[in-house]
Image (cartoon, rainbow, N blue to C red):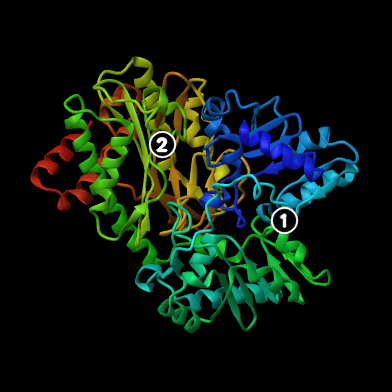
Amino acid sequence: MSNLKKLREVMKIENIDYYIIPSSDSHQSEYVAEYFKGREFVSGFTGSAGILLVGLNNAYLWTDGRYFIQAEKELMGSGISLMKMRTPGYPTIEEWIKDNLKEGETLGFDGSLFSVNQYEDYLKIAEENKSIINMEKDLLKSIWTTRKELPKNKIFIHDEKYSGKSASEKLLEVRKNMQKKSADYFILSSLDDIAWLCNIRGNDVRFNPVALSYVIVGKNDATLYIDKDKVDSETGNKLKSEGFKIKGYFDIEGDAKLLMGTVMFDPNKLNSKIFTALNKDVKIIREVNITTNLKAIKNEVEIANWEVSQVRDGVAMVKFVKWLKESIGKEKITEISASEKLTFFRAMGENYKGDSFGTIAGYKDHAAMMHYSATEASQYELKPEGMFLVDSGAQYLDGTTDITRTFILGPITEEEKRDYTLVLKGHIALSLAKFLRGTTGINLDILARRPLWNYGIDYKCGTGHGVGFFLNVHEGPQGIRPEGNTVALEPGMILTNEPGVYKEGKHGIRTENTLIVEKDFESEEFGEFYKFRTISYCPIDLQGVNVEMLSSEEKDWLNNYHNMVFEKLSPYLNEEEKEFLNTQTRKI
């Protein structure tokens, strides 16, 4: 409330009636460096997704279904009202502003934190309401005295033995796509796209091996805009040899003003400060980043590396499960200490570079919060009873992992066992899918939900997301969700499969594996058909399964999956661990 009050005082001085603070950075990243966590600073809400609207007399925070329970707790007593996204009775932030922004009032925000599309949406509303847009001010500068500096971590080259292609090869692919669109320049601002294109990795954003940067690709040259302190001579020479000039991070805006001809960019990624700096005479092409589509299809080298990293990750998971099952009730284990133990096992593996996101370790009702993050004050101690959900992953030089298991620590209720089995049935249904070329994630989402819907249960999030290769754990353009994604699934795409049940005050259950899209067969009459291959290897806790609820096909899938897990992981385990894994993957 103190920070909210300070912000309102600055708003009055600057004649701003409403001020918007998003969760993003200047690159529209999902996860951001500490410098950009202004929404959290003002509101106290710590979730990764949300947008804050502060008026002189009221304040609202919009977030999605993953964070409803968490947001209600963290906003309590703040004077900020929760607005539930995609929920009947709650307007979107755009709808609220359109209905409440009065003639002559000023809507303010820092333009560098908003995409072109967002900026134009607000501009349209302001024009219709005869209001004013002020996107020049970062009002937090004067009140956020403890704000972290922009990160200055060194970048490094991601070796071609992992990436499968050189940066110069990727640059050539980009230019071929530019030529098809008759584009003279391509402005790239999304950090994972830049890391992929340049074959660089960094450490500017926790869990995401990226570096704050921009790229402009021309017909004959390409420029990487980055803090030069981050680039040592060896890395700089490698980038230059691959066709990149290097300029300062903040030089992008000035250079954008000089571009002529046809300029291509993704309006959901490029920030409005750079957009409004463009010469008014340039012709604009607005499309999803060329690189986003290119990096979504993993090459053979990446897939082979990924398989190795997934096996390594599975070994760490089995060691963790063995420790958990054998230690529960014998030593004190908390949500945090369990998370730390899992990180310890992963760190023992080759090529480990850190976790791929903050581990979600929720015991009993804490697991009902989809993106729960335990603190010293909130954490539970685990007991030999109930269920413990652990959603985790790692960054390796040769791949990124994301896996969820819900562990049965002792006696559970019939309702919990039923819900656990329903989640498994949904997971299996999606795993078994065969689908025609051109199918999107929207078409497949119902497969995972149907067993739950039959019991009047749903989950307020997507079923699966793309995963980057030693990059962001959430990666587009593909996804599996009920709405909003029309990208056709293609061989080489990686996605997660993670249906769940979340009952506030009771329990949360999720079973998640990573899948790769592969060609299944081709019909002369109907065309190509695709399927999923599971590439996550860890037992699914059989103590939670009501076998009577499974069909013969579902039992076969589970038995075959567990057989594969044992075959993949057992060569890397000692005899005691092998025996444990053999029990955990027993046939049902």
State left or right for residue 278 relative to residue 214.
right
Return the x and y of residue 144 as percentages of the image width and height.
60, 45
Above or below — where is 219 with respect to 386? below
Q: Earlier in the sequence, mark 1 or mark 2?
A: 1
**Front of the two marks 1 and 2:** 1
Q: Which mark is residue 427?
A: 2
Near mark 1 (Cα within 10 A), the count class, few <14, some 14-19 or many ≥20, is many
Return the x and y of residue 29 as percentages of the image width and height.
56, 53
Disc 2 marks a residue whose amino acid type is: His
Mark 2, secondary structure of its residue: helix
Above or below — where is 225 with respect to 473? below
Q: Is residue 585 visible?
A: no
Return the x and y of residue 253 as percentages of the image width and height.
69, 68
Disc 1 marks a residue whose amino acid type is: Val
Q: Which mark is residue 465?
A: none
Q: For residue 200, what is the image quadrant?
A: bottom left
Q: For residue 403, what is the image quadrant?
A: top left
Mark 1–mark 2 Cα distance, whole angstroms, equals 37 Å
Q: Residue at x 49, y 77 (%)?
A: 169
Above or below — where is 479 with respect to 63? below
**Circle 1 sits on which residue?**
116
Q: Is residue 33 visible?
A: yes
Q: For residue 399, what is the image quadrant?
A: bottom left
